[in-house]
Amino acid sequence: MKRIAEAEKESQHVLDQAERDVTRMKRELPSRIAFMREQILQEAARQRQTIMMEAERVGAEEAERVTSDTRNQIEALPKMSQARRSQAIQKAIDLLLS
Amino acid sequence: MSSGLEKLVDSIIEESRIKADEIRKQGHGECEQTLAKEKTEAVREADQISRQARAEAEAARNRLVSQAKQKARLEYLAAKNQLVRNVLNEVRGDLIRFVQNEHAYRGFLVKVIAQSIETIPSETVRVFLSDKDIRRFDPTSLIREACETVRTNKKVGPGDTAIDTLGGAVLTSEDGRIRADCTFEARLELMEPRLLTEISKTLFGS
């Protein structure tokens, strides 16, 4: 009978240990969740920064292309044919004298 | 210890171990389930951040390009306007040359005097010319030709002073209250918007 009582006691000890293990797991759960969330959200923030930087780079390139095209167009303006300038002057004179 | 008792003791301990494993397994399962649920939520938040980042990035890129386009449009427009203004200045230069062409300029003077006589609602009209034109042309002769052109009965005569102008004439009623300014300066000022439009149309086709 003594041996059985000891076995029962050891059995209860094993069960108690299991309960303690579960309690510990549950106690540690919030910090595991927090760590996991932090990892995922940090990665998202890093990706966000990469996306924004890439957009800024692409936008700046496109803006530079627009500026360059306009610069070329502006530089081409004074090279307009003299015939067209003379025509514009003549039209204006005709209007003034009419 | 008899083997029967030994078996019973082993069985009690084994049973508790199995039960302990089940407790652990269940506890572990619950924790993993919660963790998975939280992970799904965190991933959803991360996806939301990514979607928002892509939208913001697209907006930022568009803003940069749009600002550049707006700036470019303004610069191009300013350059075109400057070119049109330059041509208008050349028109002023051409007017000086036109005034030097005595024959053509005299015809113009007669025409503007004739056109303006009827716009002055007064029986007596005075015609004012520049000092240079007074010396170059006979004002009375100019006025006579203009009156013949419009066949008017008005009394039209030269003004008593010279006006400061590049070319053209100023006509007034006798008391000077009503005035028709047909100098080049006045015409240029009055017609500037139209002239700029016409020059722009000819240069750029719009």
Image (cartoon, rainbow, N blue to C red):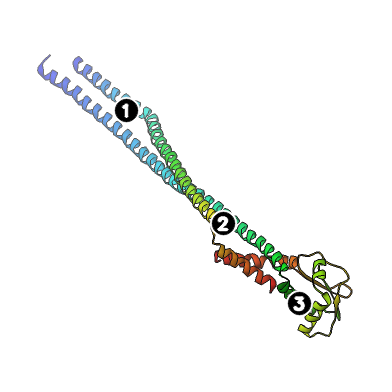
Cα distance in 3D space between marks 2 and 3? 38 Å
What is the chain letter for disc 1?
Answer: A
The type of residue carrying mark 2 is: Pro
Instruction: Name the side, left or right, on which B133 lies relative to A49.
Output: right
- Residue named by callout 2: A78
Work out whether B97 lies above or below B16: below
Label 3: element kind: helix
Q: Which sits earlier in the primary sequence, circle 2 or circle 1?
A: 1
Q: Residues within 10 Å of mark 2 (few under 14, many from 20)?
A: few
- Residue named by callout 3: B110
Q: Quadrant of the C terminus of chain A?
A: bottom right
What is the chain letter for disc 3?
Answer: B
Where residue B89 appears, as percent x and y from the top left, is 67, 60
Question: Which residue is more in the foreground, B204 or A87?
Answer: A87
Whether residue B125 is visible here, answered yes or no, is no
Q: Which residue is painted at 74% across and 67% down in the image? A: B184
Label 2: element kind: helix
Cα distance in 3D space between marks 3 and 1? 114 Å
Where residue A78 appears, as percent x and y from the top left, is 56, 56
In front: label 2 or label 3: 3
Label 1: element kind: helix
Question: Which residue is more in the foreground, B77 or B31?
Answer: B77
The type of residue carrying mark 3 is: Val
* Cβ atoms at labels 3 and 1 below 8 Å apart: no
Q: Which of the 4 quarters of the picture holds residue B128?
A: bottom right
Question: Which residue is more in the foreground, B22 or B122?
Answer: B122
Instruction: Name the side, left or right, on which B98 lies relative to B128.
Output: left
Cα distance in 3D space between marks 2 and 1? 84 Å
- Residue named by callout 1: A22
Q: Residues within 10 Å of mark 3 (few under 14, many from 20)?
A: many
